[in-house]
């Protein structure tokens, strides 16, 4: 099974990319591909840009990566209570190819932050809107206080209760 792991931010030190990568690795027998949103940098979406230049090649590649996967694990960073600009832009461009950006794939949606809120606001928004974009959300989990619950050196959750919750969520993929 090919699992696509996405940290929905362009931060080069993304804790959400770390969480998505770890979670995807929990899928039994998974061949994990980790996307770096920095590889999909493109102009801010606008109808005028689309009309003058067409859909950006990076958006086409992003959409194809989802299509090639058997499942998607995405962890959302929260900027001011919402999606990061980098993720939202890529998503907006990809939706111009087809509104069914997730292409009917099973999706696990996660979020984390350094604080106790664990980026729950953006996760809630993502889960609620996912069906409109053809995602089959199989589970979701917010991980609060990332640095208290994740061993960065080992690249894994250190909080046993969260480990068990995440394993339970990942079995649904």
Image (spheres, helix red, strand yellow):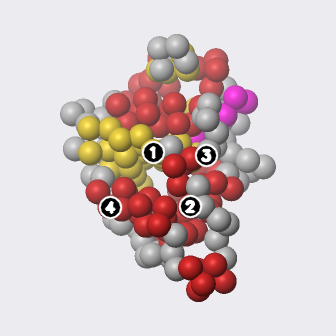
Residue 67 is tagged as: 4
Among the 4 quarters of the image, the one containing residue 103 = bottom left
The question of residue 44 being in magenta is answered with no
Cα–Cα gap, marks 4 and 2: 15 Å
Q: Residue at x 53, y 54 (%)?
A: 40
Q: Earlier in the sequence, mark 2 or mark 3?
A: 3
> In the shown orientation, is residue 10 left or right of residue 67?
right
Q: Name the residue rendered at 73%, 47% in the picture.
A: 79
Give the CA distance from mark 1 to mark 3. Answer: 10 Å
Q: Earlier in the sequence, mark 2 or mark 1?
A: 1
Give the camera-side residue of 168 and 88. Answer: 88
Which sits earlier in the primary sequence, circle 4 or circle 3? Answer: 3
Q: Which mark is residue 90?
A: 2
Q: What element carries label 4?
A: helix
| 107 w.r.t. 92: above or below | above
Q: What element carries label 2?
A: helix
Q: Which of the marked residues, 4 or 2, is nearer the chain's N terminus?
A: 4
Position in image of residue 23 (x %, y %):
41, 33
Res 35 label: 1
* Residue interval drawn in magenta: 111-116
Q: Residue drawn 41% across and 61% down?
A: 61
Give the residue at the far bottom of this rendering.
Answer: 51
- Residue under label 3, please give it: 9
């Amino acid at each position: 099974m090919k699992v696509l792991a996405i940290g929905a931010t362009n931060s080069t030190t993304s804790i959400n990319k770390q969480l998505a990568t770890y979670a995807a690795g929990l899928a039994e027998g998974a061949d994990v591909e980790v996307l770096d949103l920095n590889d999909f940098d493109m102009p801010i979406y606008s109808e005028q840009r689309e009309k003058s230049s067409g859909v950006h090649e990076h958006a086409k590649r992003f959409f194809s990566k989802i299509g090639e996967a058997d499942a998607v694990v995405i962890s959302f960073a929260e900027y001011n209570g919402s999606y990061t600009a980098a993720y939202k832009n890529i998503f907006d461009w990809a939706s111009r190819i087809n509104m069914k950006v997730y292409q009917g794939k099973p999706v696990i949606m996660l979020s984390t932050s350094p604080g106790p809120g664990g980026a729950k606001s953006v996760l809630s928004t993502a889960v609620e809107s996912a069906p409109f974009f053809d995602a089959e959300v199989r589970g979701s989990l917010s991980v609060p206080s990332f640095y208290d619950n994740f061993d960065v050196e080992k690249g894994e959750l250190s909080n046993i209760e969260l480990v068990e919750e995440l394993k339970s969520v990942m079995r649904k993929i």
